[in-house]
Image (cartoon, rainbow, N blue to C red):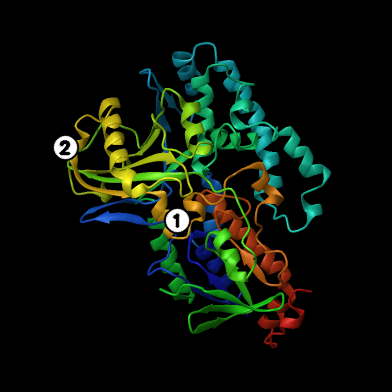
Amino acid sequence: MKAVIAGGGIGGMIGALLLKKQGMDVTIVEKEQCLGGRLQYAKHDQFKIDKGPTIVLLPDMFRTVMRRAGIGDSEYELIRLDPLYDIHYENGKTYTKYAEEDRQLEEIERVFPGESPGFSRFMSDMRGRFQKGSEAFLSNPFLTKSSFFNIDTLSSLIKMKAYKNVAKGLSHYFTDPDLINAYALQTLYIGGNPYATPSIYSLVSFSEHEHGVYYVKGGYASIVELLERHLRKSGIKVQYNTPVDRVLLDGPRAEGVQSKDRKVKGDLVVLNSDFPGAEELLGRKKRRYIPSSGCFLLYLGLNKKYEDKKIHQFYLSNGFRENMKAVFQDSRIPDDPSLYVFYPSIIDQSLAPKGKSVMYVLVPVPSGEMIDWEKEKNKLSHRVITILEKRGFAGLRKAIEWMEIRTPQEARTEGLYGGGSFGIAPALSQSGIFRPQVKVPGFDNVYAAGASVHPGGGVPIVMQGALMMADVIAEEYKTELERRRNGDEYNPGISNL
């Protein structure tokens, strides 16, 4: 049996290895000259830094999927962070997140006196909700309406208070707005508005404490090199510089993909580019989705090191709610932006020359086409560097040897829907069964993986989605795969019985 995967992002690569283990002949068709999708390095001379995702959550899920794909724990290094990160407020106070709950309670009392009992309640409540949420939403594909609209799933949504937004849900535990923001900002990891994203996504901030925050030695992009070695070792074919123009269809059945005058035939097709765009390859009328937020990114190579910094830190603006309103409602660059800074050189010397360092700065900004980024990007980069110099990185501007800027305009050009950096937004109307699923409805043998596909964004979650997709294929093609293993001829007419 032949599987064709259109797109070589993390979901496509993991999916390819899993399908190969099932005994399939797998071909990845990739439009770029390299694999990885959003997992890439920004490079200049001896400087390199992750271009996209940086924060590693759900380490057990990450390891489990990697093992299922044939990659052992010893082939990469996950470094556990403790402290997790700092949150810097404009009024001068800093709140540090720790892995250990007792130490966190002490930190809360230091910065937010009287709020620690709320944190204990938050952790206790979220433990039960995480278990239910993981079973209901991270482990199950919703291939039929009844798989979602049933008592168990709907009661889980009610218990997780999905009808509230994250910030509103956190007000049940905390009273200080700054502390609420410290546990709401994590929706930005997947491009969601803390004041609109369903409360079930509070599980992200809980998971940071419960399961830990990690760093992949060498950066997330180093995983791509590892996966590529396993793809070659497994005999998986990769066709680079091959953009897919359309899926070859015979009614509801896919027969492969076409790129210009080249056809790549297959018995099933997996779509791994950002789903709103990939869906058009099926000849469907273009649907409207809500894109996630965009990112304004600076990649910096510095001629010095800041020894007093953590690998992750957040600098919140004084008016965080107004900041989010500008990004998600007004579609404008915030007057007083909040920033995330990734500084891996503090623990990883492999990313820059000796005595130097690399830095990644992210500003949440609107997706869409409302902003002329060619006009605005230099002004915003100047403002961001000024803010960082003022709030903790003294002499930053003079230390810059290399700077690269990435805006939603580049993201849109590369095929990310609306220029959003995280797939479609984690809105209630785009979660669960309302999100694109691992099997595309209306087709016999078309499947999907990626950040816009259930269960959602974030590297381990996308990997989990690829695992679900492969398991669905294994179940649907169980009879045919057994026939092939027994040396019988492949019969596409019965493959989905």
Residue denoted by label 2: 398
> SS at mark 2?
helix
Closer-to-camera residue (368/161): 368
Q: In the figure, 437 relative to 311: above or below?
A: below
Q: Left of 233 or right of it: where is 436?
A: right
Three-letter amino acid code at disc 1? Arg
Q: Left of 355 or right of it: where is 107?
A: right
Closer-to-camera residue (335/295): 335
Q: In the figure, 277 relative to 123: above or below?
A: below
Q: Which of marks 1 and 2 is in front?
A: 1
Residue denoted by label 1: 412
Quadrant assignment for the C terminus? bottom right
Q: Measuring 48% from the left and 56% from the top, which residue is drawn there?
A: 416
Quadrant assignment for the N terminus? bottom right
Q: Left of 218 or right of it: where is 214?
A: right
Q: Can residue 406 be seen in this view?
A: no
Which of the 4 image quarters holds residue 341?
top left
Which of the 4 image quarters holds residue 250?
bottom right
Tag 1–tag 2 contact (CB < 8 Å)? no
First along the sequence among labels 1 and 2: 2
Closer-to-camera residue (410/175): 410
